[in-house]
Image (spheres, rainbow, N blue to C red):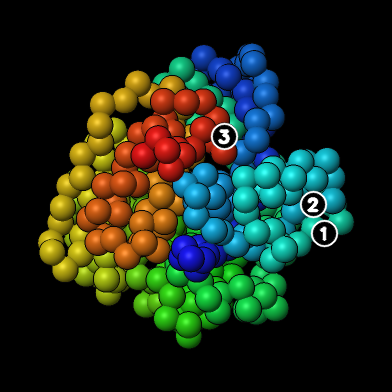
C-alpha cells in the first residue's frame, strides 16, 4: 500500500481575470488591453494544492469559496484533479478574484480581492483540526489572515508535521509563526522585504535563516533557480534553460513540488532541485493550474 499521508494546504482562492497589455499602467493612466480571459487558476493556496495534486500526491485543501459560478467551477476542477475538498467551505457571496495585467515580459501586476479569504479564519482551521492528524506536510501562505497560518502551524506542530510557509504577500506576522515554520520559501522580492534590504538571494536566505531562527530558507530567484540556506550553508540550485512564456504561478508550482518531495523523505537539497525543475516546466506554458508540471514530466 502506498503512502497515504496527505499534504494539507491552507489558503485563499481567487479566480484570475487576465488582460494582456503592452505596458503596466501607471497611477492615473489608462491603457488598452486585449485577449481577456478567465483561466482556471487560483490564489496562492489553491494553486499550490493543484500543483501537489498534479504530481500524484494526496492533498487536502482548506479554503473558502463563494456560492457563484466561479466558486462552483473551481470546486468541480479541484475534485477533477484529485484534491480532497471536503475540508473547504462554500459561503454566500462572490468568489474572490485576482485582476492580472500581463505585459510582454510575462511578469504580471496583480490586484486581488480577498473578501472570502478573510473568512478563512483561525476558528475555521480549528474546526477542521482533524485534517492535520495524519498529514505529512502543511503548507500556508499569507493571502488569508496571518493568524490562520499561525493556527494551522500550531496544530501541525502538535502532530509532528513539516510546516512550509510561503510568505506572500509580505504582511506583519507574529514572531511565533516563524518559530513554528520548518521551511520558509520567499521569492527575491519577499526575501528583501523581510530582511529590510536588497541583496543577492543567497545572502538574503542566510540572513533570514539566522535572524528568524529558521531551520531552512529557500529564496526562489526565477531564471536563476533557488538558493537554499540550511545547516549545510547556502547552496545554489540552478534552473535549466527555459523559454519563459508566463511566470504567473511559478512560485506556487515550486512550493507544491517541494512539499511533495519533503513528504517523500528527500533531503532539502533534493526537494529544492525537484521544485526548480517543476517551476521551469510551468513558466514555459501560459496560465497556472493546468500548466503545473505532472509527475510524468518530472
The residue indicated by pointer 3 is: 290
Q: Against 200, is 174 above or below?
A: below
Rendered location of residue 17, percent (x, y): 67, 32
Question: Along the polypeptide, which appears first: circle 2 or circle 1?
Answer: 2
Residue drawn at (15%, 56%) of the image: 234
**Labels 2 & 1 near each other (Cβ < 8 A):** yes
Name the side, left or right, on which 47 lies relative to 216: right
Q: Secondary structure at mark 2?
A: strand
Q: Earlier in the sequence, mark 2 or mark 3?
A: 2
**Residue ID at (29%, 33%):** 223
Disc 2 from disc 3: Cα separation: 21 Å
Name the mark on residue 66: 2
Q: Mark 3–mark 1 contact, CB under 8 Å? A: no
Q: Mark 3: which secondary structure?
A: helix
Tally of numbered tags: 3
Q: Position of residue 40 (x, y in %)?
A: 65, 35
- The mark nearer the N terminus, 3 or 1, is 1
Amino acid at each position: 500500500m502506498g503512502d497515504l499521508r496527505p499534504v494539507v494546504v491552507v489558503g485563499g482562492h481567487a479566480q484570475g481575470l487576465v488582460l494582456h497589455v503592452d505596458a503596466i499602467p501607471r497611477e492615473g493612466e489608462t491603457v488598452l488591453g486585449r485577449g481577456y480571459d478567465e483561466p482556471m487558476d487560483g490564489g496562492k493556496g489553491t494553486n499550490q494544492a493543484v500543483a501537489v495534486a498534479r504530481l500524484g500526491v494526496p492533498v487536502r485543501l482548506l479554503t473558502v469559496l463563494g456560492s457563484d459560478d466561479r466558486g462552483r467551477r473551481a470546486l468541480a476542477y479541484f475534485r477533477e484533479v484529485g484534491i480532497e475538498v471536503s475540508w473547504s467551505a462554500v459561503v454566500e457571496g462572490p468568489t474572490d478574484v485576482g485582476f492580472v495585467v500581463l505585459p510582454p515580459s510575462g511578469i504580471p501586476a496583480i490586484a486581488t480581492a480577498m473578501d472570502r479569504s478573510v473568512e478563512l479564519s483561525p476558528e475555521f482551521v480549528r474546526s477542521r483540526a482533524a485534517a492535520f492528524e495524519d498529514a505529512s506536510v502543511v503548507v500556508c501562505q499569507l493571502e488569508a489572515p496571518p493568524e490562520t497560518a499561525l493556527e494551522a502551524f500550531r496544530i501541525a506542530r502538535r502532530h509532528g508535521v513539516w510546516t512550509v510557509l510561503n510568505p506572500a504577500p509580505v504582511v506583519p506576522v507574529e514572531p511565533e509563526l516563524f518559530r513554528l515554520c520548518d521551511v520558509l520559501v520567499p521569492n527575491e522580492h519577499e526575501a528583501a522585504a523581510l530582511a529590510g534590504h536588497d541583496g543577492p538571494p543567497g545572502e538574503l536566505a542566510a540572513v533570514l535563516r539566522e535572524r528568524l531562527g529558521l531551520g531552512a530558507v529557500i529564496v526562489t530567484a526565477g531564471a536563476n533557480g533557488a538558493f537554499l540556506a540550511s545547516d549545510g550553508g547556502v547552496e545554489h540550485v540552478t534552473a535549466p534553460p527555459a523559454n519563459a512564456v508566463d511566470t504567473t504561478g511559478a512560485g506556487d508550482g515550486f512550493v507544491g513540488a517541494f512539499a511533495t518531495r519533503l513528504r517523500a523523505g528527500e533531503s532539502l537539497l533534493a526537494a529544492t532541485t525537484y521544485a526548480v525543475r517543476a517551476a521551469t516546466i510551468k513558466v514555459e506554458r501560459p496560465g497556472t493550474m493546468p500548466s503545473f508540471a505532472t509527475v510524468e514530466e518530472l
